Amino acid sequence: MSTKRPIDGLFSRRALIAAGGGAAVFGGLIARLFQLQIMEHERFEVAAAENGVRLDLAPPQRGRILDRFGRPLAAHRQAGRVSIVREQANDLTGLMAELSKHLDISPERQARLISEARRQASFQPVTVKSELSYEDFSRLSVLAPSLPGLQVEMAATRSYPRGRDFAHVLGYVAKASEADLERLSEDTNAQERAAIRRLFKHPDMRTGRSGVERYAEDWLRGEAGFRKLETNAAGRIIREFDDPSLAPKAGRDLYLTVDAELQKFAIDRFGEESGAAVVLDIETGDILAFVSTPAFDPNDFVNGISSKDYALLRDDVEYSPLYHKAYDGTYPPGSTFKMVVAAAALEAGVINPNERVYCPGHYRFGNNTWHCWKKRGHGSVNMHWAIKGSCDVYFYEIAKRMGIETLADMGRRFGFGQRWELGLTGGRSGVMPDDAWKRAARGEPWYEGETLNIGIGQGQVATSPLQLAVMTARIAAEGKIVTPRIIGDGPRPDADIPFDEPLDAEIMQRMKAGMYGVTSEAGGTALRSGDLGLGGPRLAGKTGTSQVRRISAAERASGILKGDNIARRLRDHALFVAYAPHDDPKYAISVVVEHGEGGSKAAAPVARDIMAEALRIDARRTPSYIRTASTGSASGSGSGAR
Amino acid sequence: MATMRASSLDFSRRSLWTQLGSLPWGLILLICAMGMIGVAILHSATFTNPQEAGLPMRQATRFGIALGVLLVVGLVPLRWWFWAAWPSYLATLVLLVAVEFFGTTGGGAQRWVQIGPIGVQPSEFMKVTLTLALAAYYHKRWSDFSGGFMIHLPALALIALPAALIFRQPDFGTTLALFASGGILIFLAGLWWRVIMALGVAAIASVPAIYFFVLQDYQRERVDTYVAQLTGQSVNVMDDGYQIEQAKIAIGSGGWTGKGYMEGTQSQLDYIPEQHTDFILTVLAEEFGFLVTSGVLILWMVILGLGLAIALRAASLFARFAAAGAVATVAFYILFNVAMVLGLVPVVGVPLPLLSYGGTVMITTAGCFGLICAAHLGRNEPLNTGA
């Protein structure tokens, strides 16, 4: 106390030294704070701004597919979706139990969903059900706030508002499978590959599996963007920024040349029958209707079709709803092929159109007898009569005279044996047989007797309804080139035009006259179908029957089985090709009614009604994707001048 | 002098009021201010996380309790603390041994021991009781002799014994704290400069040996990360370096004036692990900027300076050493924590007194300042131990 020890002064000195040291360290820390907060502020500010922002892949909205007048064929529909988010749920099992009171979820599926939610990142929603009914959606939406972890939202889903009408044309979209990803990332580098994979793994992303959806994938897809999200370190989303520069770019709309109303009419007209119809605009080659019936509903495929439902479609071999009969289906053209045979004969000069051939109802060649469909024969017929009465004997004769090579050459110039690229998946070339084809396909030389069969459109010649429609259009256009197309505004397919020179106009006029005779002159095979019921214009056409089976001599002798006496699948196909109006052709049509037996009875009335409808609604009028001069200046320049 | 002794022994009500009135209220008010700042920052650091919603309230409650501890410790006559110094040191040592055998594990280290219903962390008590023991020791030594080198060896043993036990838990931060504040007391007790120099050289020389043979793997990793980020190497941002990198981003993005209360994106988005405990300074720096943060540090300097002034004014050596040791203990916490958060020293779990969430450090800090208050009230007592 009062006595001064050395320690007292020592302690004070040392304490001040220590305090000085401490103050120096404090000063150093404040200097460091200054360095970080003031001198390096900018760098850290940028780092902080980037830190909390996460870019989430945002899938683009797929482009719509529209008919020629802008009616949506493939569009979007908002569908309710319910998911669970583990991070927000207090009790997953309890939540699932509560949810199953409102939705029908099997216990196995509940367990699967819970284990999936546990496996994934805790903030990642797991979809429980993606197509909620309106009632379910509203009920669950009301419930959601009281059930943490339950997420009820709307998501855009591909929809096909016209259902089965365009099933085969549009195809459908589905979640990308491993095979799809492989295909989509063809010809890409590793980086693009990874981007494609990431994009298509998004739950909202679909890819075209068939039809236009697949062919025009690049056009429709658009570009993926990003959602700019502020997140915490755990990855939970705090809020979303609105950044237009990052928004996904929606895919482009695609216009088809088809008329949805005509298509629907045509499908309805087929009723219960199975078959195909193609309506072409003769002038432009626009496909106005592309019918294959029965069809499936592509909406069933968007969220994955059940294997049971798919098996039902796949195993229906008699009506084959999955099959695009107008494009993938090939049939012997039957008598609809006779214009090709006649034109070949005229061009080859093996017959004069006025020369008469006698038809006793059969034709002998070698040791065999070929029959005319008309058992008692047509008598003596020239080319015009042979076409309108569809005399088989006449065509046996001229086919034999010109030989298969001349015939096949004309067939190919009409587009047979070659595939039309339309911008859809599928499409068959059919067969225009000749010696070389047979040697390649069968390893045998061509026999002359086979030429006779080809002369009446039977045997190995196989044609698609599309090819028949193109043939008809070329005849109606008096030989001008008609290239079919179905994509009006979209990725134009590199049309591999099978023939590039017009056919002889004079010969084509004779063919037209013959087809007019079929529907409008005494002796025509389809007289009842010539009148369109529109007053003046008539329909010109040609019937055909394509044989499904060989008719044995015994059966021929006892009477050919028809109608109820024979199983449907063994009945012949009924064909009809036509154009109208006869004096100023605008539309060409081909119709195949499978197992319909008679072209005049089963196919011609269908073709006539569809044609009448096309004329009535003026299906070929200017499509909305083509801007005429007047509308172009009004909407294009934006000047507003009228 | 006789009257003084009588009054401090007499625990009449009037006397208690007098004592209360003569407490260092300036110091206590500044401590309260720091506590308020702590609760406010904690509110900002935790309000986005619903699971942490109750934390600021609990912190405020703890601060209230801590204030009570401070006052009680402060009002207990200094002489009592002098008597209790050795028994409390020994008791804490026993508890540390008990932790060794019966302790429960928390956060990877064995630190807790159960006494009845309460979990106790004896290593925290040791910070206060070691200060008391060293103060009592030097008080007695300097009354008997007059310096010399040998008097410091028992002091070193007093430090090393509990430090070794705590290091085994393992708790590197507390071990360091004991050596730092204890070392300061030895320094104040007049350790010769040449010994200090020699120890400094030896300490630097032993760094590699400590690194390779003493540190645990996870501690070594932290040191590695620290060296890497100091030398500007890219650290594994997902790992150990993540915390310090995120902390630097938060602090650096604060700028002069910060992003505003509860506006710190780093802090609000939970980017910084432990941001409400050891890394609370990042929230302050990000949201209030350099001016306020350095202001808070200066406020700490003022508080510590006031504590040191009390130590210098005290008459008895016990009061001087006890107050100085308390100041050193709190100062070590602050300096080490801030240096750690600023990326200057490796990440060792050292909280920031009064600002970090957590009860233990709050009570320890209160105990330290209580001791300073006791030294203040008993500044004129000679505490002659029968010499």
Image (cartoon, rainbow, N blue to C red):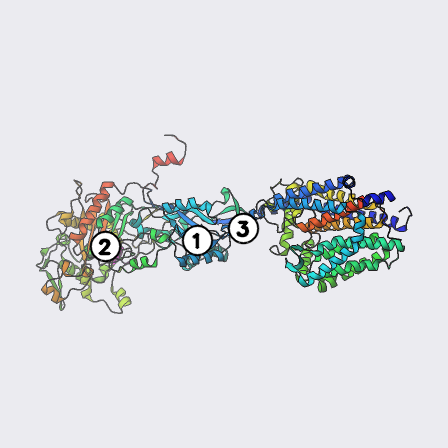
User: Circle 2 — which element?
Assistant: loop
Residue type, mark 1 in image: Met
Q: Verify whether residue A420 appears in magenta.
A: yes
| Disc 1 and disc 3 on one polypeptide chain | yes
Question: Disc 1 versus disc 3: distance between alpha carbons?
Answer: 24 Å
Would you say residue A43 is visible in this rendering?
A: no
- Write down the quadrant of residue B41 in the picture: top right
Of residues B341 and A310, which is closer to you in this image?
B341
- Looking at the rendering, the stretch of residues picked out in magenta corresponds to A409-423
Label 1, on which residue? Answer: A96
Task: Kindly identify the residue that appears in the image at 35 percent across and 39 percent down.
Answer: A627
Q: Which mark is residue B257?
A: none
The reply to whether discs 1 and 3 touch (Cβ–Cβ < 8 Å) is no
Earlier-in-chain disc, 2 versus 1: 1
Label 3, on which residue? Answer: A235
- Write down the quadrant of residue A574 in the picture: bottom left
**Place of residue A129 in the rendered image (x, y in percent of width and height, measured from the top left):** 40, 52
Residue type, mark 2 in image: Ser
Q: Nearer the viewer, mark 2 or mark 1?
A: 1
**Place of residue A256 in the rendered image (x, y in percent of width and height, measured from the top left):** 33, 46
**Place of residue B329 in the rendered image (x, y in percent of width and height, measured from the top left):** 75, 51
Of residues B152 and A464, which is closer to you in this image?
B152
- Binning the other alpha carbons within 10 Å of mark 1 as few (below 14), some (14 to 19) or many (20 upward) gives many
What secondary structure predominates along the stretch shown in magenta? loop
Q: Verify whether residue B126 appears in magenta.
A: no
Label 2, on which residue? Answer: A274
Earlier-in-chain disc, 1 versus 3: 1
